[in-house]
Amino acid sequence: MNLRPWQRYALKHPERIKEAEKKYRQSPLGKRKAAQRSRFRAYKITWEEYTDLVLRAAGYCEICERQSETSRDRELVIDHCHMTGKIRGFICQACNKVLGFMETHGFGEDWPDKAKVYLNLRG
């Protein structure tokens, strides 16, 4: 069997390889890569499709148009339809919560306008 040097090393030192892999998985880069793989599997998208979404959003929420921040509510997430599984784009966590709530509870399309009128009258 014709093995490459790194393969021979891995066969001789499986415990070192296992430890290095564990260390990588716990590193920020390893965690980011694992989350990315998980998203690709969950949403059944390719790297190219993901890249297209990222470029289209350009770091901004596609609903409120605020720039993504490191704070939890302004972090961009992949928005998708829970009925069809279709990916719609990147939106911030805050908009995702509101959108999810509205979809889950079946508010009509005129609800946001009614809410604005209410807030203007009572606010």
Image (cartoon, grey):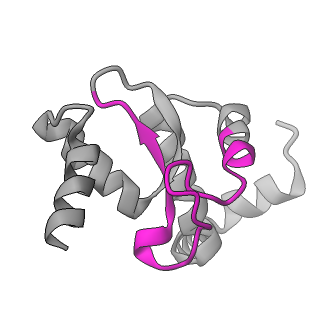
Residue 15 sits in quarter: bottom right
Q: Where does residue 40 sit, x and y in percent of width and height?
A: 54, 39
Residue closer to the observer: 77 or 13: 77
Image quarter where the C terminus lies is: bottom left
Residue lying at 36% horizontally and 30% vertically, measured from the top left: 81
What is the count of numbered marks? 0
| Residue 16 appears anywhere in the view | no
Tell me what residue is drawn at x 59 percent, y 76 percent.
28
Q: Quadrant of residue 109?
A: top left
Image coordinates of residue 117 in percent, x first then y, are: 22, 54
Q: Residue at x 51, y 75 (%)?
A: 26
46 vs 102: above or below: above
Task: Return the x and y of residue 63 as percentages of the image width and height.
Answer: 50, 49
Left or right side of 64 for 47: right
Taking 115 as reference, is 28 above or below it? below
Which of these two is toward me, 90 or 28?
90
**Is there any visible trace of residue 77 in the rendered image?**
yes
**Magenta residues, as a range?**
53-82
The quadrant the N terminus occupies is top right
Q: Is residue 63 magenta?
A: yes
Q: Is residue 65 left or right of residue 56?
A: left
> Which residue ends up furthest to the top in the rendered image?
84
